[in-house]
DNA sequence: CTTTCTGCAAACGATTTGCAGCAGC
DNA sequence: GCTGCTGCAAATCGTTTGCAGAAAG
């Protein structure tokens, strides 16, 4: 089965950004991007290793750093034991996270437009008052996920 | 010099909540709350130990867990090396965080009213769509602080 | 061919924990 | 006085790193 055009586009982007930072395209790196791209939520290292046991844990950590430096991957830290990784937002679209306070799971949710507008307004007001120049923002809803209800 | 009435109220709350969870009031615990209450931003363990070198590091970690379980303290994890601690929001008022991507510092900022309203609307819409029942939210602006400009 | 990646195993470092003595109540 | 806190030092565990052989370009 041929790859979809979206996958081809993604692999093109991966190649470009890796080369731009002087890195090579390898099977491990493509597998990592493929995994993250297929997930609808940020993944932990154990989840990644479970899904691709042939990737050594140290290689996973190392490559996720490389991919993050290349601007392809974003690392998220919650109160959970493990960090989580997702594709950069310019590849997935802007979104926020629903974090379950019971089971610790993290779920993606598209950013509501009204909320984004309000953040923009607030950001400007804060810049005026404090001199803080925001580059981006992060909104988490913490609560109880459907599965834990 | 007598303690201010606010401090007395705070110590009363600390006593009540510690007792409610079967814990004792100790000098270390009061010192920790006092430090966090005086700060206008969440503090790291090194900052806390610097300010009160008589508290053993392990006691600081242990007591912050106790205070968190008592609902007095809130633990925050950023991408920085250390976790940060602040008083629970029902003691300080609802606020958000400005996180500097250069120096890693974290600064408190009061929650703008319009933004809170938009979050409330978005939360309801998300609950309807996904079944996620939000208990609270967290908004971080990531950017460059005044000092790093 | 040269440079960079990979896997293994060892190192690192923030946080946690066991234990013997001290303090809250 | 009994229970639970404190400090010290050792253990834990997610993450990072050194090194020798393998792959990318």
Image: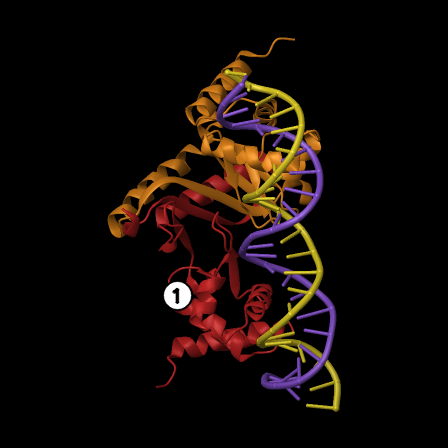
Chain colours: A red, B orange, C yellow, D purple
**Residue A22: % across, % down:** 65, 74
In the displayed structure, A26 sits above or below B142; it is below
Question: What element does badge 1 sit on?
Answer: loop
Relative to A50, is B59 on the left or the right? right
**Residue B12: % across, % down:** 49, 16
Identity of the residue drawn at 42% across and 61% down: A93
Would you identify the image quadrant in which residue B36 lies? top right
Identity of the residue drawn at 53% across and 76% down: A28
In front of the other: B16 or B33: B16
Residue highlighted by disc 1: A39
Identity of the residue drawn at 44% across and 64% down: A47
In the displayed structure, A135 sits above or below B33; it is below
Q: Is residue B3 visible?
A: yes
Identity of the residue drawn at 49% across and 52% down: A81
How many discs mark residues in the rendered view? Answer: 1
Q: Is residue B43 visible?
A: no
Residue at the outermost left position: B128
Relative to A16, is B55 on the left or the right? right
**Residue B72: % across, % down:** 48, 29
In front of the other: A104 or B146: A104
In front of the other: A88 or B11: B11
Placement of the C terminus of chain B among the 4 image quadrants: top right
């Amino acid at each position: 089965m041929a790859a979809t055009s979206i996958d081809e586009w993604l692999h093109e982007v991966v190649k470009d950004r890796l080369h731009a930072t002087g890195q090579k395209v390898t099977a491990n790196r493509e597998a990592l991007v493929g995994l993250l791209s297929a997930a609808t939520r940020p993944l932990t290292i154990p989840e990644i290793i479970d899904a691709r046991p042939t990737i050594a844990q140290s290689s996973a950590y190392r490559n996720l750093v490389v991919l993050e430096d290349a601007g392809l991957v974003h690392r998220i830290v919650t109160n959970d034991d493990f960090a989580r990784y997702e594709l950069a937002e310019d590849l997935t679209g802007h979104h926020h996270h629903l974090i379950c306070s019971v089971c610790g799971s993290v779920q993606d949710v598209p950013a509501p437009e009204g909320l984004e507008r309000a953040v923009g307004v607030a950001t400007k007001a804060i810049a005026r008052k404090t001199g803080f120049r925001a580059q981006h923002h992060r909104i988490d809803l913490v609560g109880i996920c459907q599965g834990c209800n």
